[in-house]
Image (cartoon, coloured by chain):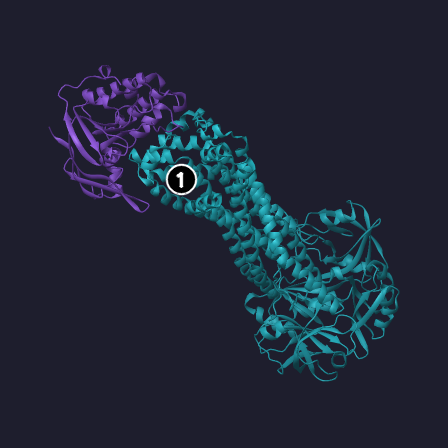
Chain colours: A purple, B cyan
Amino acid sequence: METVMLTKNLHKTFYTGEVPVHALKGVNLAVGAGEFLVVLGPSGSGKSTLLNILGGMDTPTEGEFIYRGTPLQSMSKYELTMFRRKAVGFIFQFYNLMPNLTAYENVALATELTETPLDPGLVLEEIGVGDRQNHFPSQLSGGEQQRVAIARAIAKNPDVLLCDEPTGALDYETGKQVLNYLHKINREMGKTLIVITHNAAIGGMADKVIYIRDGRIDRIKDNPHPVTADEVSW
Amino acid sequence: MLRRKLWRDIKQNWGAYLACVSVLVIGLMMYVSLALILESLTDTQQKYYREHSFADGFAQIVKGPAGLADDVGKIPGVGRAVGRVVQNVFVHKPKGEENTTLRLVSFSDQQPVNRFRLEEGKIPTGGQLELLVTPVFLKANHYKIGDRIPLILQGREIKFTITGTANSPEYTYEIPSGQTLTPDPKVFGVAFIHYDTIAPLAGMEGQINDIAFTLDGGTEFAEAKRPVNRVLEHYGLTQLYPRKDQLSHSLLSNEITQLKGSVKTTPVIFLLVAAGILYIMLRRMVEQQRGQIGILKAFGFKDREIISHYLSYAVLIGGVGGLGGGLAGIWLSFTLAKMYQQYYNLPDLTGKVSISYLLIGTLLSLAFSLAAGYQGCKGVLSLSPAEAMRAPAPKTGGRTLLERVGFLWQILSTQGKMAVRNVFRSKQRSVLAILGIAAAFSLIVATAASYDAIYYLIDFQYGRVERYDIKVGLRNYVDETAGLTAAKNIPGVAKAEPLLEIPVTMSNKWLRKDLAITGLPSGASLYRLMTDKGTEVVIPDNGLVVSTQLAKILDIKIGEKVTVKPLVGDVTERQVTVRKIVPLFVGLGAYMELHDLSNLMGEPAMTSSVLVKANPARLPEVRKALQEGKNIAAIHDKSKLKAQFEELMESSKASQFIFLSFAVVMGFAIVYNLNLISLSEREREMATLMVLGMTEREIARILLFEQGLLSLAAVIVGIPMSYGLLWALINANSNEIFNMPLVLRTGSMVQGLACTVVFLLAAQWKMKGKVGKLSMLDVLKQQD
């Protein structure tokens, strides 16, 4: 399997105030193309920091981050922006849709940024909110908003989808629905999917589960028989 | 502890606070400096008049015995009177140099009225060839005390020693006549000379030609006018007028009146804008800090305490702005005083250090800030603690009016659509932004255009109405043919035409007005009477043409007869029919055919001036010849008047520039603040866009597009606002004499637009930096 993302001895130290906080203390990770990866860890374990670096939103203090053979750790702000633009799609806990754009326009906004976008209407249709296209975020439920956010992320046609607690703000049933869609995207479209969460149950759906504790990878569990969202519960 | 919160909040957003404070500072600086200079001008004027017994009435006669002054002094109601010899003479200069006229004003040892103020040197002795000149004249012509100055008197060159310098309340604005716009001490000056010296040299021994008198308290000039007139009418009374019509006094007073207007208007614009910015800022802060307010309330802080915390921002801004503006205003008042002294001979005029204005300024600033601040943060009151800690109701997006225009909406990119909806989303703020930018824009345009009307008037008057090169003012009325022949005989003169000006009292029913009737020969080409629209007015026979303004003052209708009493010569009043009423730029105009006007005086044809058009190449030659001519009182060189005027306009460019910069700073402050607020409200959106992979430049472009939309609307609103402001400005400058046209040149509009673009881009540029500093990570982690 081709390696999409590779980190070598990744360190990240924050200086908030006078005490340095070591969020990452040497992370070595390889992500294969088309893999579904779940990163599990308690609050403050460093999992969000890792995701931010993988998504080009932050740079490591030390170590290497290589995306398809290109080192990114010393890239300029502009180059990182271009990386975010072309290679990754983000999905957040709190959707972060543009409140004054309709569902369709939110997706279209993202497609204006890339050269090989998917059709916003089709993607929304595919993800089950096709009939809500002309609604504004304030007229949509949380689950619908998160689906629009997913549509926005994949419509750019990125290589990797990064999800930060994608079900964190949703109720149980809606959360499962959203996971189903993510799973579908991974299986059917072949997108690499990295989900960070503290919900251990989601790990059952992944190809690989990374346990993070105190800024280090505690262990990696391969999951030869991933299940669907319908089969997990928490 | 809350105080600490205040400091930290301000530190975080110092740019916005600074912008707000700077607008306040500008507003108060203008208020305080204008108010101080106004007070200083008024005080200096009054003190000067009082200490030097400035006259209440003035009279000019052709010639009369020196005892006439005593006769005038004996009239009941008249205080003291002084008789003088006043005569314009040329300074002798080598060939080719420009004319310098010196007005010799006589004084006696015991001068009761219009005393001069000795600035330097010693007072000339009677009988000696000595005189005093004004300090400005001395400096401009590079003379020193003790120098000898050659004057041409009665055709002879006589050298006088300058023994010192002096100023007089009669010549605070040192110009020869109302036709001159600004003092030019190289061309005209005033000198004080002992009566015993000048009288014999001017052939006026025991004679006078000018009387100035004071009035007893409680006596109006109108009451004294008739008896004074009776005493002087047999001596060729040419002019009799009250202090309010005295040239220097009326110009200085006019300036004071205008200042009074400016003090009340301009600063208020800036204060209102600052208040608007503060309002938005505090409102935004209260909204942003709802959670904190909830916690404070839950702790048990009273509403009053929380409100006073938020008001303390307003107090701080108002206080700093007021104090800063007050101090800057005091400083500026000294600079303004220096500026005034370039035009007015008011040696005592200075700026002022005034604690009371500092206090008034600060209080004013505090009042505006507190009012705006309270409006901005009164929302705190209605919040219950639990409600406050909850997030505000989610922002709703919605369709806008523009979307109905299908094709327009379709061509917009999604980013463009976002910008348009943003503009419509916060309507109140957009309206404020539009008004704010429009205010700055119209202030800039009106400032840039403030002289457009004057330029237009000058071009009109000197280019189309007055087409001569030189107007030669004669000492007496002379026979028309004689005057013209003399002028035409000068080599180089291409054309000469007579012009007769007679001072009269014109009355209709109980209304009356002193003015001059101008007599023009039929078919005149060097002076063509024109309406304000530029159509030539043909002067009818046997009747008057009067301006609309004069018709209004005297309530005259076409075909009615008015009573005309010439103030010169021994002529009784006559009835003259008004044949035409026309709108003119120069207000108090009344015109007649030259021969008809002469008839009114009982003469066949006379002239008081000769208008001369010279062969362009020989103009200097003609000028020189005229200068040597006898019986010439004044030479008005049109090109020089025009040049002088243009120089004046150039010199006012500096203050125009300062004003423009103020307006640009104000515009910047408004836009920058609104942008900051807009950004802080939308940090989350901006961060999301960055995560999506938009570059800073692309995000800034969205903001720029929004700003562009608002600015476009602002300019559309601003154009009529500019005209309105300009109209107000012009109306403040219009008076009986000038009826200013509303002129806004394209250049001024372009200048306004350019300045607007400058402050918009400057604000935008500052914003781009702010966008770059946004942390995607922090922002996106929070719940909306």
Secondary structure type for disc 1: helix
Question: Quadrant location of residue B648?
Answer: bottom right
For mark 1, name the chain. B
Vertical placement of residue B387 versus B583, above or below: above
Residue B516, by quadrant, is bottom right
Report the side of B671 relative to A44 (left or right). Answer: right
Give the left or right position of residue A46, taking residue A9 as reference: right
Would residue B245 be found to the left or right of residue A168 on screen? right
Q: Where is residue A46 in the image (x, y as percent from the top left)?
A: 24, 35
Question: Which residue corresponds to mark 1?
Answer: B704
Q: Could you tell me if residue B720 is visible in this image?
A: no
For the point 35% across and 16% down, which residue is it?
A131
- Residue B657: x and y in percent read 51, 55
Q: Is residue B771 in view?
A: yes
Residue drawn where x is 84% and y is 55% of the image: B574
Residue B236 versus residue B39 in the image, above or below: below
Within 10 Å of disc 1 (Cα), the crowding (few <14, some 14-19, many 20+) is many
User: In the displayed image of the protein, which residue is found farthest to the front?
Assistant: B300
Q: Which amino acid does label 1 sit on?
A: Leu
Which one is in front, B509 or B668? B668
How many numbered discs, if any? 1
Q: Which residue lies furthest to the left in this view?
A: A1
Residue located 60% across and 55% down the image: B358
The C terminus of chain B, quarter of image: top left
Q: Who is closer to the viewer here, B553 or A53? A: A53
Seen from the viewer's position, the closer of residues B181 and B33 is: B33
